[in-house]
Image (spheres, coloured by chain):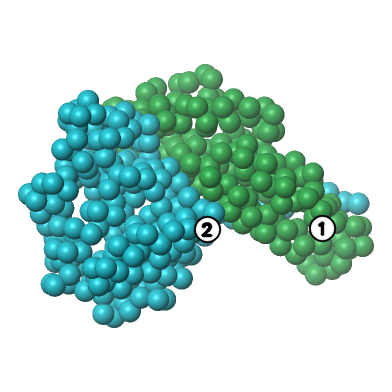
Amino acid sequence: MHEYSIACEIYEQVIATARAHGASEVRAVTLQMGRLTHTNPEQLKFCFDVLAEGSIAKGAEFLVEMIPPNVECECGYRGTVDTPGKPAGKSEEDRGEGGGKSGSENGNETGLHQSELLEYVAALNCPACGRAARITGGQELIIKTIDIETEAETEAETDNKF
Amino acid sequence: MLMHVINVGHDVFAANDKLAEKNRKSLDKHGVLAVNIMGAIGSGKTTLIEEAIKALKDKYRIAVIAGDVIAEMDASRFRKLEVPTVPANTGKECHLDAKIVEKALKEIDLKNTDLLIIENVGNLICPVDFKLGEHLRIVAVSVTEGDDIILKHPMIFKTAELAIINKIDLAAAVDVDPEKMVSDIQALNPEVPILLTSKHSRESLDLWVATLEAGLESR
């Protein structure tokens, strides 16, 4: 269980960025998480919520977009593996996942992360030739954006700087 | 009140990777070979390290970072072998990270070290996400963990650079086929060298020691 320390780092980064932009409140935090990380989005959200109590990020929406694995194979294939064992881009279920979805809509993604990650990785072969491919992506954990609120005057000050 | 969306783009693991690179640079500067030994609790990491120390300490200068949540038992086992040992207690964490190793490196005389052995916290899951700056990622697994242990923890085997299947003398007693474990590892990671070891087989331990020595010679 290393979600707590990761949540601490996310919290510190979020607060620092929010303050630097004169935020009075953080409304949402959006993360991008590689599907191959051993980090549980639900536990991470729980830890973040606890840390954010009493701060400007209290009650912020915590959104996690999952990133599919990227592989490089000696057959020359370079790209994502949408669904292990199936050629990239041919899985209807996986299409349209990730990008800009809200936490609740990502419920299935979270489920996959917990229960099916093992099979997922075990079956992670090159979509083109089926051999074991080298993983080049899918292990990221990126704080993508934060949605903040600022007081109007603060905004004016910020604008003057540019 | 005005709403803004701020692009952050901060990768939490990348921050660890960056620190790991820094660790690697200071190891390289002093010509130290660093190995990170990962594996479950009871897989035999400490024993394998002890055997390596006994066999190599007269020829090479060895130091150990002994990762554990709180105890210092492992560290004291290494100290008995008279090698500089830094216990790295993670406190609440299930893995070592680059920051803990960076701190531990300050207590090691790198100029007078050839081989740094880092024993990770007993865990097949969490250490995967955290590079330390090591040159060789080793995973040790014992037959007593069951022959489905590899497919249950694929990422650590997929990303390992050396895999050790330990306690093979007990395979029949626990009804495990080590060959199944070998083929499971090969399916995930076809290139990875695999050693089958037992503390009761001198021959198998010699192979483990020789693997480390080959790494030391090719520095």
Q: Secondary structure at mark 1?
A: strand
In front: label 2 or label 1? 2
- For this orientation, the residue located farthest to the top is A92
Residues tagged 2 and 1 counted as in contact (Cβ below 8 A): no
Task: Reply above or below: A84 against B192.
Answer: above
**Viewer-side residue, A80 vs B10:** B10
- Which residue: 50% across, 47% down? A140
Give the image quarter of residue B173.
top left
- Which residue: 48% across, 41% down? A38
Say what amino acid the circle numbered 1 marks. Ala
- Which residue: 12% across, 57% down? B210
Residue B151 at x, y = what percent? 34, 30
Q: Secondary structure at mark 2?
A: loop
Local crowd size for mark 1, using a 10 Å CA cut-off: few (<14), some (14–19), many (≥20): many
Local crowd size for mark 2, using a 10 Å CA cut-off: few (<14), some (14–19), many (≥20): few
Label ID, residue B88: none
Q: Colour of chain A?
A: green
Report the residue marked by disc 2.
B91
- For this orientation, the residue located farthest to the left is B203
Left or right: B150 in relation to A21: left
Q: Colour of chain B?
A: cyan
Say what amino acid the circle numbered 2 marks. Gly
Label ID, residue A23: 1
Location of the C terminus of chain B by quadrant is bottom left
